[in-house]
């Protein structure tokens, strides 16, 4: 089971030819894929038309959609932010902090293409999905 970040879905939908997209393609049909509600929002908000949004939503709903925020994750994410800040690292996007914290708490590997997750892997125990 892996969680796939919006950074990967967006590149996949745009037809990019990168290792994280190849890894997603390899996982399709062979691994259980989780889409977080936060990732769903990020992907859908970037689309220009309602038709495109409906089509992409239909695609993403083929996978399990999980709620990633909530009181416990919010508190843990804030703690993780402070831990990293003490190391001189600032996570730029709160949504990435929530996603990373949810994955850490649930021990679910994350496939991503976003530098905000790398310090979470190095210092907080986020499991990153290996790419080809």
Image (spheres, helix red, strand yellow):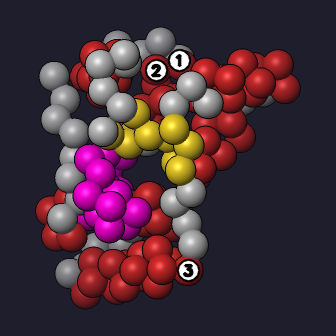
What secondary structure is marked by label 2?
helix
Please tell me in which quadrant of the rendered image residue 42 appears.
Answer: top right
Could you say which is closer to the camera, residue 82 or residue 129? 129
Residue at image coords 37%, 18%:
28
Residue at image coords 32%, 61%:
106
* 129 magenta-colored: no
What secondary structure is marked by label 3?
helix
- Tags 1 and 2 in contact by the CB under 8 Å rule? yes
Q: Position of residue 93 (x, y in %)?
A: 49, 62
Choose the circle earlier in sequence order: 1 or 3: 1
Q: Is residue 30 left or right of residue 55?
A: left
Q: Which residues are magenta?
A: 101-120
- Tags 3 and 2 in contact by the CB under 8 Å rule? no
Q: Taking 36 as reference, is 131 above or below it?
A: above
Q: Residue furthest right?
A: 50
Please tell me in which quadrant of the rendered image residue 5 appears.
Answer: top left
- Dot label at residue 71: 3
Residue to which mark 2 is pinned? 12
The quadrant of the image that shows the N terminus is top left
Q: Is residue 125 left or right of residue 4?
A: left
- Dot label at residue 14: 1
Could you say which is closer to the camera, residue 92 or residue 36? 36
Real-space Cα separation, disc 3 to disc 2, in angstroms = 31 Å
Real-space Cα separation, disc 1 to disc 3, in angstroms = 34 Å
What secondary structure is marked by label 1?
loop
- Tags 1 and 3 in contact by the CB under 8 Å rule? no
């Amino acid at each position: 089971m892996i969680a796939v970040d919006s950074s990967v879905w967006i590149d996949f939908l745009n037809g990019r030819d990168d290792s994280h997209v190849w890894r997603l393609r390899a996982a399709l049909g062979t691994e259980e894929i989780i889409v977080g509600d936060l990732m769903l929002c990020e992907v859908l908000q970037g689309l220009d038309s309602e038709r495109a949004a409906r089509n992409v939503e239909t695609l993403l709903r083929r996978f399990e959609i999980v709620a990633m925020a909530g009181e416990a994750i919010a508190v843990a994410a804030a703690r993780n932010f402070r831990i990293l800040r003490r190391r001189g690292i600032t996570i730029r996007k709160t949504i990435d902090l929530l996603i990373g914290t949810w994955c850490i708490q649930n021990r679910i590997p994350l496939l991503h293409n976003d530098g905000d997750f790398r310090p979470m892997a190095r210092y907080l125990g986020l499991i990153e999905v290996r790419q080809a």
